[in-house]
Image (spheres, grey):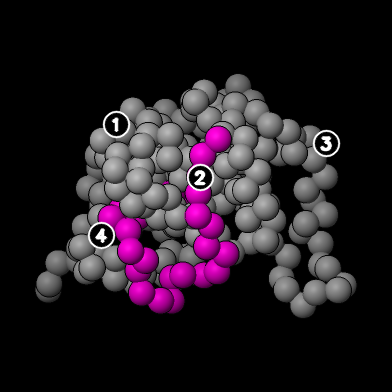
Amino acid sequence: MRLMLVPSLPEIQLYLAHPGSGLRRLLEPDDDSKAEPQPPYWAYAWAGGAVLARYILDKPSVVAGRRMLDLGAGSGLVGMAAAKAGAREVIAAEIDRNGIAALRLNAAANGVAIDIVDKDITAGLPPAVDLVLAGDVFYAQEVGLRMMPFLDRCLAAGIEVLVGDPGRAWLPRSRLRLLDEYQVPDFGDAKGAVVRPSGVFSLEKERDR
């Protein structure tokens, strides 16, 4: 991993993958563990996280003085942007053990304090926060289906939910209100590729039928 500035986010640096990282080995089964191999999502800046981070840094009043949760934190990009923008408390929820290690390194590199929750919190009650920031949590159907009940419980508890996403297939569009758009690169884009607009949305409560 190499410490680098994040494209479109010069205020933040992350330990990111590069051609010599050797991360492919993390996709191979571990003979000493029954756990499924975890793709190194935390080694890249995803568009959904990048657009949320850019939005927060441009509009620090969104998080200033508030307690917030970075859900499915990965590299911790969104949480670090919130901390830099003046959040009162930042909680980052991440289940991948390598992601947790990356989170700690990235927080130290950026000089911010982040409380890491190293378990799946989506099955339980919402934590004591004012705002949930969900960057790129709808990249797969099964992930989105697991996230939505938790996010609905957050809304029911009076917690605001903001979603960052480049328009992935499983995005719950009918529940979202667009707040802003930014041109940010995605983790799979080739170097020099044309960036596409990604959105920051407010998740709305489901309407009674």
The local crowd at label 4, few if under 14, some if 14 to 19, many if 20 or more residues have their Cα within 10 Å, is some
Which numbered circle lies on residue 77? none
- At 54% from the left and 27% from the top, the residue drawn is 7
On the image, which quarter does residue 158 sit in? Answer: bottom left
Across and down, in percent, residue 137 comes to: 45, 56
156 lies left or right of 137: left
- Does the rendering let one see residue 168? no
Of 30 and 138, nearer the camera is: 30
Residue located beneath label 4 in the image: 159
1 or 2: tag closer to the N-terminus: 1
Mark nearer the viewer, 2 or 3 = 2
What whole-number distance in Å separates the C-alpha atoms at marks 2 and 4? 22 Å
Across and down, in percent, residue 175 comes to: 24, 58
Residue 135 falls inside the magenta stretch: yes
Amino acid type at circle 4 is Ile
2 or 3: tag closer to the N-terminus: 3
Which image quarter is the C terminus in? bottom left
Residue located beneath label 2 in the image: 113
Residue located beneath label 1 in the image: 59
83 lies left or right of 66: right
